[in-house]
Image (cartoon, helix red, strand yellow):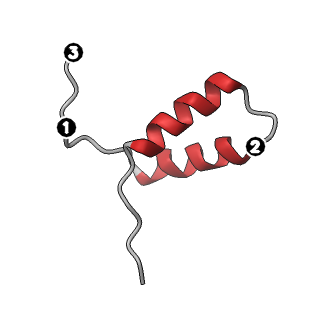
């Protein structure tokens, strides 16, 4: 199935992905999937 170019990761998933990346006990596979999710995440709005 082809992925649409405008699909984005939800805030909830992006938050969880960030926690996985900062957890030293996460496996390489978990970190890889988390990084992929964050790549698709919406940019944070700056104040």
- Kindly check if marks 3 and 1 are in contact, taking CB atoms under 8 A apart as contact: no
Asked whether, in this view, residue 5 is left or right of residue 45, the answer is left
Q: Callout 2: few (<14), some (14-19), or many (20+) C-alpha neighbours within 10 Å?
A: few
- Kindly check if marks 2 and 1 are in contact, taking CB atoms under 8 A apart as contact: no
Q: List x then y, in percent, for residue 7.
A: 25, 40
Residue 7 vertical position relative to residue 27 in the rendered view, above or below: below
Precedes in sequence: disc 3 or disc 2:
3
Q: Callout 3: few (<14), some (14-19), or many (20+) C-alpha neighbours within 10 Å?
A: few
> What's the distance in space between the residues labelled 3 and 2, CA to CA?
32 Å
Q: Residue at x 47, y 45 (%)?
A: 38
Asked whether, in this view, residue 14 is left or right of residue 21, the answer is left
What residue is disc 3 on?
1
Q: Residue at x 18, y 32 (%)?
A: 4
Query: Residue pushed farthest right?
Result: 25
Q: Callout 1: few (<14), some (14-19), or many (20+) C-alpha neighbours within 10 Å?
A: few
Q: List x then y, in percent, for residue 18.
A: 60, 49
Asked whether, in this view, residue 32 is left or right of residue 2, the answer is right
What residue is disc 2 on?
23
SS state under label 3: loop
Q: Quadrant of the C terminus?
A: bottom left
What residue is disc 1 on?
5
Disc ID at residue 38: none
Asked whether, in this view, residue 33 is left or right of residue 3, the answer is right
The quarter of the picture where residue 24 lies is top right
> What's the distance in space between the residues labelled 2 and 1, CA to CA?
29 Å
Q: List x then y, in percent, for residue 6.
A: 20, 43
């Amino acid at each position: 199935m082809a992925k649409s170019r405008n699909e984005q990761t939800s805030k909830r998933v992006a938050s969880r992905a960030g926690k996985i990346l900062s957890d030293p006990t996460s496996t390489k596979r978990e970190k890889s999937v988390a990084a992929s999710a964050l790549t698709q995440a919406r940019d944070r709005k700056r104040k």
